[in-house]
Image (cartoon, grey):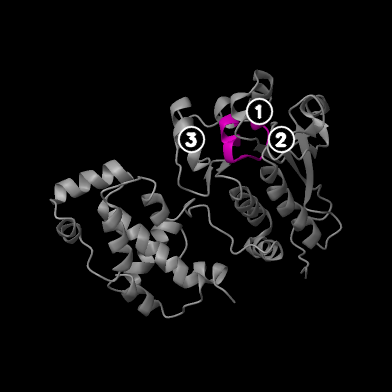
Amino acid sequence: MRERKTSRGPRAGAMPRRVVILGLPPVDALDVIGPAEVFAFANRLHEGKTAPYALELVCAGADIYIESEAGIGLKGHRTLDQERRAHRPIDTLIVASGFRSSDRLDKTTMEWLRTRARTVRRICSICVGAFALAEAGLLDGRRATTHWGVAQSMAERYPKVQVDPTPIWVKDGNIYTSAGVSAGIDLALALVGEDMGDNVALEIAKNLVLFLRRPGGQAQFSVALQSQRAVGSSLDELCLWISEHLEANLTVEVLADRLATSVRTLIRTFQRELNTTPAKYVEAVRLEAVCRALELGERSTGEIARRYGYNSFDVLRKAFTRRFGVTPKDYAERFAKR
């Protein structure tokens, strides 16, 4: 494996940024190891005297050994009680937990999170670690995400939180929440990108042999997969037809006629079964197809626009930028096969 060194990092004489991963046992092991590998690789790529990050694992349990849901234990650097007494500054605090630990959130840990949130530069959660941030009141009035499978439960349990089950990760102020399992790696890459630049984050992604570095706005699962979650949906055949005819003029009238129903009924059905509108669904499927084309290295933007139902590349570019926050050109430069 080839490692290309980078000089960007802490200024000369600066201390490493202290990154603390707080493990709430039983933790999902990948929620800890995935982000940790990203920060560790940033240190390995750095050629200056001072490594950019000082990475530490703190266990919220009775000792430094953290039980994982996979049955493989992890050894931390210290317990939360030891961390509390040390009063050492933290730059980035990341909360990792597991599906079983979301119902075991003790008041002492929550109080420590509330206190620490006032002084850290960034506070983050991986997957269901968002439940801990919500329990501590840190997500009140904020937009946040978590694993799609528990997003509804989180929204019901914490009504003051604006839970969005779709994105890979969400940033609201200095608080970051991420989706399930591998999304913690995406979030860690984004954090390193903020600190050291996108080129460094992309280099780490390549060295970790990741298929691509996913932006926060990317969905946790494909639009087609999301539509299949409504088992036995009356829209199943129509959604399949849409995916096979993206070049067509897919107006709501055309779709209603295809389903042999009224426009009003079609709109109500989409809202009830897929929680979206026909127009938004079509655009999401089209843009997802555009992403795949760009990732595969296709360069003819005009052809891509025509193939997926856009009157011009300018119309496609505006829709793409509105949804993903980057232009098709920037997306291709980051994620296309070389």
Q: How far across and down, in percent of the image, does residue 57 sit?
A: 77, 39
Q: Mark 1 points at which residue?
A: 113
313 versus 159 height, above or below: below
CA separation, marks 3 and 2?
A: 21 Å
- Label 1–label 2 contact, CB within 8 A: yes
Distance between the alpha carbons at the discs numbered 1 and 2: 10 Å
How packed is label 3: few (under 14 Cα within 10 Å), some, or many (20 or more)?
Answer: some
Q: In this view, does 140 lie above or below 56?
A: above
Q: For the residue labelled by badge 2, is the local secondary structure a helix, a strand or a loop? A: strand
Label ID, residue 22: 2
Taking the spot 42% from the left edge, 80% from the top edge, the residue there is: 300
Q: Which amino acid does label 1 sit on?
A: Leu
Image quarter hosting the C terminus: bottom right
Q: Image check: 277 left or right of 42? A: left
The answer to whether residue 167 shows anywhere in this view is yes
**Quadrant of residue 210 in the image?**
bottom right
Residue 142 is tagged as: 3
User: Measured from the top left, where is residue 126 in percent x and y?
Assistant: 61, 41
193 displayed left or right of 218: right
Q: Residues within 10 Å of mark 1 (few under 14, many from 20)?
A: many
Q: Is residue 120 magenta?
A: yes
Tag count in the figure? 3
Q: Is residue 144 visible?
A: no
- Compare marks 1 and 2 and give the one earlier in the sequence: 2
Disc 2 crowd rating (10 Å Cα; few below 14, some 14-19, many 20+) is many
Among numbered discs 3 and 2, the one appearing first in the sequence: 2
Displayed quadrant of residue 284: bottom left
Q: Give the range drawn in magenta.
A: 115-132
Q: What element carries label 1?
A: helix
Nearer the camera: disc 1 or disc 2: 2
Please tell me which of labels 3 and 1 falls first in the chain. Answer: 1
At label 3, the amino acid type is Arg
